[in-house]
Amino acid sequence: MNTKTKKLQLPLFWKFAIISTIVVLVFGSINIFFLWNSVYQSFESEIDKRCTVLAKIIAKKSITPIVYNDNLSLHNILDDIKQSDPSISYIFILNNYSELIAHTYDIDIPKDLIEVNNIVNGQFNIKVIEAHNYKYPIIRDIAFPILNGEVGIVRLGIAEDHIRQEITNATKYLMLMIVLFFFFGIIGAFIFSHLITSPIKKISQKAQEIDLNLIDSEDYNIAIRERSRPFNISASDELDLLVEKFSEMLKRLKKNYIELKKTQGAMAQTERLAAIGTLSSGVAHEINNPISGMKNCINRIAKNPENTAQNIKYLQLLKDGTERIEDVVKHLLNFSRKQNIQLLKTNLSLAISNAISLTHHKLESNHIQVLSKLGSAFFIKGNASRLEQIFVNLLLNSLDAIQDRKEKNPQLKGVIDISIQQISDKIYIHFVDNGTGIPEEIQDKIFDPFFTSKTVGKGTGLGLSVSFNLIKNHQGKITFTSKTNLGTEFVLEFPIFQE
């Protein structure tokens, strides 16, 4: 089972905006991470220095009271220092026997707290501990030696949560700056996307607005943006170059399209003249038949000029003959004359009938029957002469195909079936023949100019190509189906005439 892939169309503006926003968010997030770590590490380093300095001050001030066993002075020193700094959770001093001799607790110090930290090799040691009985449960504890540990140890606890609050306050300002960076970065991303995609969008709109039918009057200068020139300096970038090249391309397109239209007109005229050459024997026959009758009438009148009743009869026949010749010549001249294409209300049924009349003798002399079911009048916006040329080309193409098949099967009765029908707002014309058909390997080439499968001298290779372009000029379509040695069906589609 084939699954249909859904195609999501995302404008280039949003692609640039999304990518730029993602870049801002990713790099902003990375900056937040590294800045947070950097700030936290800086604060930790400062806290450690602060703990060390405080512990060192306490150790120096405690030496004399410890030596003289002045516990009251020692308590006063500890209380004064603790009250001077709200981040200090506790201070206590152990003698060189690890016995508690002074502290800032109102009650006894827990034994676990005394044992949780100690100096290492006579050097201070810092630990982060969790104390559940304190206002701030996370505490940075330092054990600092007094006189290298010979007198005792100072234990100082600094509330980590208090420090974290300082970090949080600092981080808030940092986050505010980063949010502003995000905000202005995203705005910048959208502005950048607009600057990049706006000229491209204008180029796209210009390309969509191109009307080949009005190409002579199109303006191909594209203004992508207004520049301020306070110093009378013009700065260009790749987008300006792109617009300039696109405008030049459109001008070349205009020139080439005009030349193409001229070439197509010349090709159509050439094909018409070639068709006239093909039809010349039939036209001569259509003229010779009335002339023979007219000569006979003249001879009869000359033999008996006084027979008034007979002369009136023969004069009427002479008039009918001249009118028939006039119609044939007029029709041929209209078909061959080079005209400006004007699309007017045109009867398709009449155009097909005229094409059949032009090719009648040619088809009849090759024993090919035309079955036409044209019905009532069907009107489209078109040019009668060009439509007749299309139908003549298709009739002659079918004639050649039937002749080719007759060479292999002389008993074949050639038939061309033409029908016309209206479905909704479209008119469909079917040309069906029982000719040799179109080989599958050349079916994609039959509308190419100068392509022909006929023998040299039998065709120009322009008939179907010219017909294809003429149908396209009438806002129509042509399709076909073909089977070798069974025949071909061409289907022409035209929009119905709208008043």
Image (cartoon, helix red, strand yellow):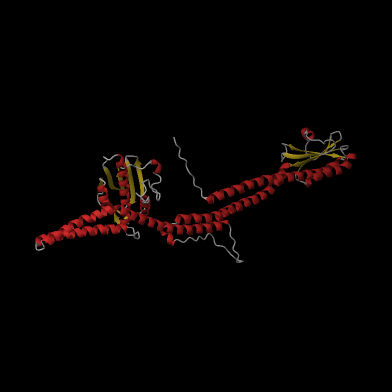
Q: Which residue is drawn at the image coordinates 21% and 54% (left, top)?
A: 289
x then y, percent, for residue 247:
50, 59
Residue 486: quadrant of the picture = top left
Q: Which residue is drawn at the image coordinates 34% and 54% (left, top)?
A: 274
Q: Which residue is drawn at the image coordinates 23% and 58% (left, top)?
A: 325
Residue 253 seen anywhere in this rendered image of the structure: yes
The answer to whether residue 464 is left or right of residue 167 is left
Q: Is residue 49 above or below residue 110?
A: below
Residue 126: quadrant of the picture = top right
Quadrant where the C terminus is found in the figure: bottom left
The answer to whether residue 394 is left or right of residue 51 is left
Q: Residue furthest right?
A: 68
Q: Is residue 223 above or below residue 104?
A: below
The answer to whether residue 144 is left or right of residue 424 is right
Q: Is residue 28 above or below residue 309?
A: above
Residue 499 seen anywhere in this rendered image of the structure: no
Name the one closer to the observer, 48 or 300.
300
Name the one closer to the observer, 394 or 271.
271
x then y, percent, for residue 171:
68, 48
x then y, percent, for residue 130:
73, 36
x then y, percent, for residue 474:
35, 54
The answer to whether residue 298 is left or right of residue 104 is left
Name the one closer to the observer, 92 or 487.
487
Q: Which residue is drawn at the image coordinates 24% and 58% (left, top)?
A: 327
Name the one closer to the observer, 356 or 283.
283
Quadrant where the N terminus is found in the figure: top left
